RNA sequence: GCGGCGGUGGCGGAAUCGGUAGACGCGAUGCCCUCAAAAGGCAUUGUCCGCAAGGGCGUGUGGGUUCGAGUCCCACCCGCCGCACCA
């Protein structure tokens, strides 16, 4: 027996062949709306589901991992993501759902292009090689993917529809072009993505990045700020991800207030969250980028200084300028504006602590109640006025001490109508007053910016727009899509998109007037490609439209989305925005694409992030080669809760490998005994099991019950631990329990382990039952087997554990009390004491309080 | 500064509703099998006192609520993540 050795490679390749040959994991579109889904979190669909009388389909479940970016080979993070996703997909299938579990590649992007610049190899070729490697490995991991729906975002059959979506947004006014400041590398002569700017320098050459004004395409995501925020309440996502999105959207409630500049006859609106402090506004500040700054200073004594200050501010890097510790600099503009609430003329300044991108690019400064304004006022000798009393410290009234004060309290030094009123109440009243007087109104401001999607890159989806001298920017007609990415000679950036060098491609005719015209040479941000791929999976081969609405009705929304937290903001926000916009345009019937989200933690090595430069990379292929995919997958799920970071250790893998080997050996041994003894599967029904058999069966049902619950809450680590416990029990009782009981316990273990170790589980299950485990419904625990006639009663004295006694399950509280009082060690602790109180928790414990 | 998450043996972690703290695994120690090794199996393993029975202590710190607190409340310390001159 001990000669038997678990050979994962032989087992795994056999079952992988079966799944590939039989296309086991493919699902068809039935073209009908399925019945409302049964509650996934509730009990699974039992064996009864097999013999369903009506012809309605089982409920659907769409399980999706974020699509991989194909670069080189998959890393261990991929293994974890798909191990989690596959476990969910299998569990849903076996609890009676039709599961859509597709795969694709986010294939456009920079690394392939940089590789092309270096080697001249076409990005299409290096990407294809990488995709092939991903496909090979996903198959070797045994992930249950519907390969018939595979797609790549770089394929014209896909990006044709990315372009189509762009046109829909354009027609709806949700895509627009405007001048924008972008990151420009003077050395590489190219625009850089924000994430390519490392501490103000170009990631590739290290040159200091400059700001440059360029005409760029934007998507109007800011129109959706409120809905993107509000609808977070309707989805089942981790709280920290929702929080990140809320922070990113950055909603602030307040008011817009007009400050009139009499000299120029212009109103300057400001946004403030604290209109209650308006009476404390003693000066006014504009951002250096504000278009009116130079015009205001013109002709004043300050003009030269203002020019100098603005020039300096504009050339200063974002890093430097954004430093909170930096002293507050700025210069006067030589002009004043009127504070609308009290008519005071207050001086205007330009200062770089005011940002053009937020609010109106100008602020009212309240040094008494804002730290930054306070700093500026102190540095420039400006008046500081307290207008809110500190309720905690009323003595500080009129004193400069305790300022700036950001707390609440009654208004002072403001206006007879408001003085004495609590500031929160005054805030509302003052906004009403401004509104009545036409000097301002309640307003909401967001931190969220419109999405800049233009990239001066080759390896991306071309923006389907043509520029005509007479007609301007003209959208490419839908029937001319896709605008195919042309082949080019030189991928190196030359101060414009590499596509601009494809003259034959760039020169075209205007779709509107047929005159000479030129194509847009920028491509789209790759986040555009990945903002709708989950829709295409529902109908991936459709050549007539992006999707058939009935296909989306059948599968969307995604029931369980799985991916890394690094996409918590960008990808997840963009995809949500796309769905809302497309729904508004009548193309979708739902608002949120991802009903539930799970974010898996990182796998580290010795506590550090794995990276080539650190040389601590553990490649999935090396683990699979050494231990097999089942061990690799189980270990990654066993080391800890999957949403937390976990460290990869060799010892841990060995342990899990031993466990799988033990399961296999016991199963082989048991199946041989079955061969000798002969098994009658009905044998338990005849006689009541007892002794070791009963113990073993109880453990099996306990595991069935526990693991079902664990899987619903993503507790894969404890689920695997429970299978280990069951196996330990099989091992312990292997001499005393019957072959039938052993066989039931082991096949149950295999069945329960299937979502994590599909190959070995299939092998063991077939060995013991002759059946295919994935075709069996998820096991159901027998409630009768979860109870026993006796249990261990915990006996406490004054809350401390003093003894344990066997108690009948149906014992009354009185009887339990008696048992506890008479427990030997309880008697010893009660000796000479007076019993004050007795607490009985049936099924658990008795606590006797004594003095 | 604002927001979120976390702190449990030598290590990864478990304890799902306020009810036996440390499941499961790693590591360690002893033993069995073996000529030997590998593989496998059995046993012990929070800590201190004790020959044992048993007892003391123990979930970042200090308080509180409770018959009973890792779990709830208050104050604090430490770590991680996100946002941040956002008006």
Image (tube, coloured by chain):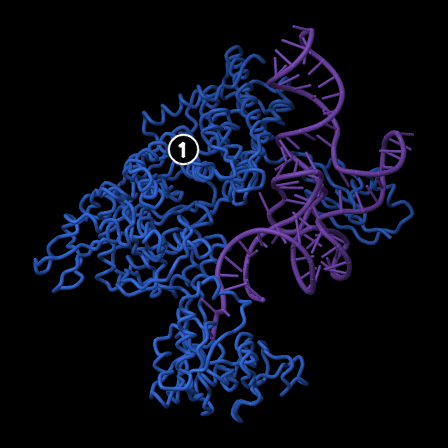
* A84 displayed left or right of A808: left
Image coordinates of residue A316 in percent, x first then y, are 44, 65
Quadrant where the N terminus of chain A is found in the figure = top right
* A655 displayed left or right of A537: right
User: Taking the image as drawn, is residue A765 in sight?
Assistant: yes
User: Taking the image as drawn, is residue A45 in sight?
Assistant: no
Q: Residue furthest left?
A: A514
* A313 displayed left or right of A25: right
Q: Residue furthest right?
A: A832
Categorize mark 1 by other alpha carbons within 10 Å: few (<14), some (14-19), many (20+): many
Residue A317 drawn above or below residue A701: below
- Image point (87%, 45%), residue name: A830
Q: Nearer the viewer, residue A150 or B10?
A: B10
Q: Chain under label 1?
A: A
Q: Secondary structure at mark 1?
A: loop
Chain given the colour purple: B
Residue A459 drawn above or below residue A738: below
Chain given the colour blue: A
Image coordinates of residue A168 in percent, x first then y, are 23, 57
Q: Which residue in the structure is indicated by mark 1?
A: A143
């Amino acid at each position: 027996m001990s000669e038997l050795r678990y050979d994962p490679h032989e087992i795994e390749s056999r079952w992988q062949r079966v799944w590939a040959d039989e296309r086991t994991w493919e699902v068809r579109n039935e073209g009908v709306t399925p019945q409302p889904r049964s509650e996934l979190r509730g009990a699974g669909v039992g064996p009864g589901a097999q013999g369903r009388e009506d012809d309605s389909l089982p409920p659907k479940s769409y399980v999706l991992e974020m699509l991989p970016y194909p670069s080189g080979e998959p890393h261990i993070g991929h293994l974890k993501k798909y191990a989690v996703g596959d476990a969910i997909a299998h569990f849903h299938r076996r609890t009676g759902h039709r599961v859509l579990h597709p795969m694709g590649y986010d294939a456009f992007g920079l690394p392939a292009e940089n590789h092309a610049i270096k080697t001249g190899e076409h990005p299409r070729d290096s990407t294809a090689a990488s995709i092939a490697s991903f496909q090979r490995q996903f198959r070797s991991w045994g992930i249950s993917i519907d390969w018939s729906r595979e797609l790549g975002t770089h394929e014209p059959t896909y990006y044709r529809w990315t372009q189509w979506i762009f046109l829909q947004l354009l027609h709806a006014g949700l895509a627009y072009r405007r001048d924008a400041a972008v990151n420009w590398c003077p050395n590489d002569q190219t625009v850089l993505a924000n994430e390519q700017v490392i501490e103000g320098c170009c990631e590739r050459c290290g040159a200091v990045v400059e700001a440059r004004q360029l005409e760029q395409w934007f998507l109007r995501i800011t129109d959706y700020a409120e809905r993107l925020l509000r609808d977070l309440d309707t989805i089942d996502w981790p709280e920290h991800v929702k929080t990140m999105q809320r922070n990113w959207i950055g909603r602030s409630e307040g008011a817009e207030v007009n400050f009139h500049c009499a000299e120029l006859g212009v109103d300057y609106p400001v946004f403030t969250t604290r209109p209650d402090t308006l009476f404390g506004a003693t000066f006014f500040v504009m951002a250096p980028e504000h278009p009116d700054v130079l015009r205001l200073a013109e002709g004043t004594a300050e003009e030269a200084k203002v020019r100098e200050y603005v020039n300096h501010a504009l050339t200063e890097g974002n890093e430097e300028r954004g430093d909170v510790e930096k002293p507050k600099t700025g210069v006067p503009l030589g002009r004043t504006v009127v504070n609308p609430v009290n008519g005071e003329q207050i001086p205007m300044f330009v200062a770089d602590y005011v940002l053009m991108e937020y609010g109106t690019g100008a602020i009212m400064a309240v040094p008494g109640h804002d730290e930054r304004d306070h700093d500026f006022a102190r540095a420039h000798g400006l008046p500081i006025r307290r207008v809110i009393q500190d309720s905690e410290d009323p003595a500080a009234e009129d004193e400069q001490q305790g300022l700036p004060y950001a707390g609440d309290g009654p208004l002072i030094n403001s206006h007879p109508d408001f003085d004495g009123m609590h500031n929160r109440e005054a805030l509302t009243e003052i906004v009403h007053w401004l509104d009545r007087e036409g000097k301002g109104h309640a307003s909401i401001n967001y931190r969220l910016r419109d999405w800049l999607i233009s990239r001066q890159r080759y390896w991306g989806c071309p923006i389907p727009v043509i520029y005509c001298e007479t007609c301007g920017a003209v959208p490419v007609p839908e029937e001319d899509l896709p605008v195919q990415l042309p082949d080019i000679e030189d991928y190196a950036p030359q101060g414009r998109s590499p596509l601009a060098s494809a003259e034959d491609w760039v020169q075209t005719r205007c779709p509107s007037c047929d005159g000479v015209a030129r194509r847009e040479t920028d491509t789209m941000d790759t986040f555009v490609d990945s903002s709708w791929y989950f829709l295409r999976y529902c109908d991936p081969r459709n050549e007539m439209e992006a999707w058939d609405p009935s296909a989306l009705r059948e599968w969307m929304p995604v029931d369980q989305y799985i991916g890394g937290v690094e996409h918590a903001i960008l990808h997840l926000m963009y995809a949500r925005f796309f769905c809302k916009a497309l729904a508004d345009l009548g193309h979708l019937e739902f608002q949120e694409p991802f009903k539930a989200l799970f974010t898996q933690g990182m796998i580290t090595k010795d506590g550090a992030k794995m990276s080539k430069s650190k040389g601590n990379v553990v490649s999935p292929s090396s683990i699979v080669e050494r231990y097999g995919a089942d061990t690799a997958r189980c270990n990654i799920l066993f080391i800890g809760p999957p949403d937390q970071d976990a460290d990869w250790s060799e010892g841990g893998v060995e342990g899990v490998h031993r466990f799988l080997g033990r399961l296999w050996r016991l199963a082989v041994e048991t199946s041989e005994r079955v061969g000798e003894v002969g098994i009658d599967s009905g044998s338990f029904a005849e006689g009541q099991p007892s002794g070791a058999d009963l113990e073993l069966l109880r453990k099996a049902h306990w595991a069935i019950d526990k693991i079902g619950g664990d899987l619903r809450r993503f507790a894969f680590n404890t689920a695997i631990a429970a299978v280990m416990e069951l196996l330990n029990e099989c091992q312990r009782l292997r001499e005393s329990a019957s072959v039938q009981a052993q066989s039931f316990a082991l096949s149950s273990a295999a069945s329960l382990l299937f979502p994590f170790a599909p190959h070995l589980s299939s092998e063991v299950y077939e060995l013991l039952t002759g059946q295919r485990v994935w075709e069996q419904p998820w096991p159901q625990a027998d409630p009768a087997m979860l109870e026993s006639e006796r249990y261990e009663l915990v006996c406490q004295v004054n809350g401390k554990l003093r003894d344990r006694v066997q108690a009948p399950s149906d014992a009354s509280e009185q009887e339990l009390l008696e048992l506890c009082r008479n427990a030997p060690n309880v008697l010893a602790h009660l000796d000479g004491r007076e019993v004050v109180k007795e607490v009985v928790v049936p099924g658990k414990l008795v606590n006797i309080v004594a003095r």
